Amino acid sequence: MNSYIKSNQRKAFFLILFSTSLLGIISYFLGVYLQNPIIIYLMISLTLVSPWLLYYNSDKLVIKSTNAILAQESSYQRLHNLVEELAIAINIPKPKIYIINDPAPNAFATGRNVNKGVVAVTTGLLEKMNREELQGVLAHEIAHIVNRDTLVGTIAATVATSIIFISDIGLRAMFGARREKGSSGILYIFLILALILAPIAAGILRASHSRSRESLADASAIKITRNPEGLKNALLILKNDSTEVKKVSPGSSALWIEEPNPKFNNRPSLIARLYATHPPLEERIKKIDDIIKNR
Amino acid sequence: MDIKILLILGVVIVLSFWLVFLYNNMIRAKNQVDEAWAQVDVQLKRRYDLIPNLIETVKGYASHEASTFEKVTMARTNAINANDVKSQADAENILTSALKSIFALSESYPDLKASANFLSLQEELSTTENKISFARQYYNDSVLRLNTLRTVIPSMIFKKFADEREYFQTDESEREVPKVQF
């Protein structure tokens, strides 16, 4: 388990290094092309601070992007109790708890280390699951924090979302230019950027999210709660539920316990279609069944 | 200086670092057990504090179940007065089953079951019960680690710096499942 955490920390480091270099290269070419000193200085400073921005602020960005709000202890007593129980079980500080106002049952975790852990659940999850099932889901999320999946996942989500944003601008600019006919060179730069960057974003997300990650978190969750049925029933509920979380950028889809389905996004993004981040729920349920049988 | 002296010096330094490491490891394991026990203790106290509230609430709806209340109160007193891990564990097991009888009793009083106060107490006791078993789980893991360190070579040379600890045993039936269903 320790080597798994180490490998995640290494991944996060290289991810930051890679995206900083990428930003540096883009800045350089943009600078050469534009010959505008103000933009060049701006890009250089952005490149220099970007590693720190990524490491310290990715979690806040992800929370912001889902419209999650801090869960008050008075109105979410049971949720707070559940999280506190699990924190006691593995002796970590109690993670912060956020609520997303959405009828679809889903949850995600973020945070760069166990001291900065955050779990977020939708109101739909709280309505549709009983105490045991919620415990299973929360243990799964806390396992992600302990395993540092959240460190890699959150940084990858931020990088990928930014890249998707840039490629989107590029693609729109291209269509705009075609209509106007008199296209300028800068639009072509964006277009080329978009074409190069889109697959890179997909690659980042794929690298950050191995398929075994979810099953590993499931196994850790069962080790914490010693109650495989709770998590299994929770996954069954997720499987049988057809509502989808509304506000999810394709870049952050890898963070959730269940894939927030991109087909209901108003604009299915190129990246989102390139691949899916989660192993099918059936596969995960089957693995839990194996654990129950071998007890 | 002679190369031999340097070599011996090097070996001595490495050896002493290693001994310091072994010693620290033992002390860390001991402190972890203490910390884990403190957490168990906090949760047990929390449960003692909740019980009088629970009895008051239930009394309001089911005043003639005096023998059940008596049993719980007695179990609570015994648990508070227990002074070593073994007797504490036994007393807590009795208290847990006594509490279950109170919640079983609530089944026959629909008004009680529906009261907001009772529901909130039920949630508080459920979570405390879970916290006790999770804290106990962590405590037992810590004890296992310490007791192993005390017996394996080479760290056993420092065993007199940390006493052997007792596991917090529970009823056989309860051990496999930490969840509670009141």
Image: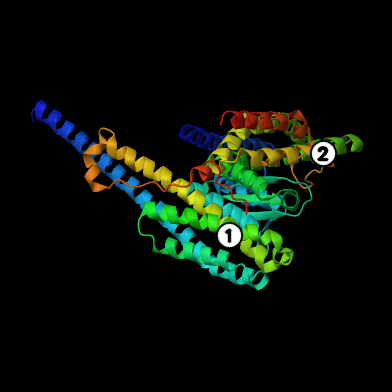
> Percent from the top left, x then y, of residue A119?
62, 50
Write the residue at 47% across / 56% down: B92
Write down the residue under mark 2.
A173
Answer yes or no: do the residues labelled 1 and 2 have beta carbons within 8 Å?
no
* Dot 1 crowding, Cα within 10 Å, few <14, some 14–19, many 20+: many
Q: Amino acid at mark 1?
A: Leu
Q: Check the residue under mark 2 and report the chain it is in.
A: A
Residue A282 falls left or right of residue A222: right
> Percent from the top left, x then y, of residue B67?
56, 66
The answer to whether tags 1 and 2 share a subunit is: no
All told, the count of numbered labels is 2
Whether residue A95 is visible, yes or no, is no
- Secondary-structure class at tag 2: helix
Real-space CA distance between mark 1 and mark 2, rounded to the nearest whole angstrom: 60 Å
> Percent from the top left, x then y, of residue B38?
41, 57
Write down the residue under mark 1.
B125
- Secondary-structure class at tag 1: helix
Whether residue B142 is visible, yes or no, is yes
> Percent from the top left, x then y, of residue B19?
22, 39
Closer to the camera in the image, A26 or A172 = A172
Where, by quadrant of the figure, is residue B58 drawn?
A: bottom right
* Residue furthest left as drawn: B2
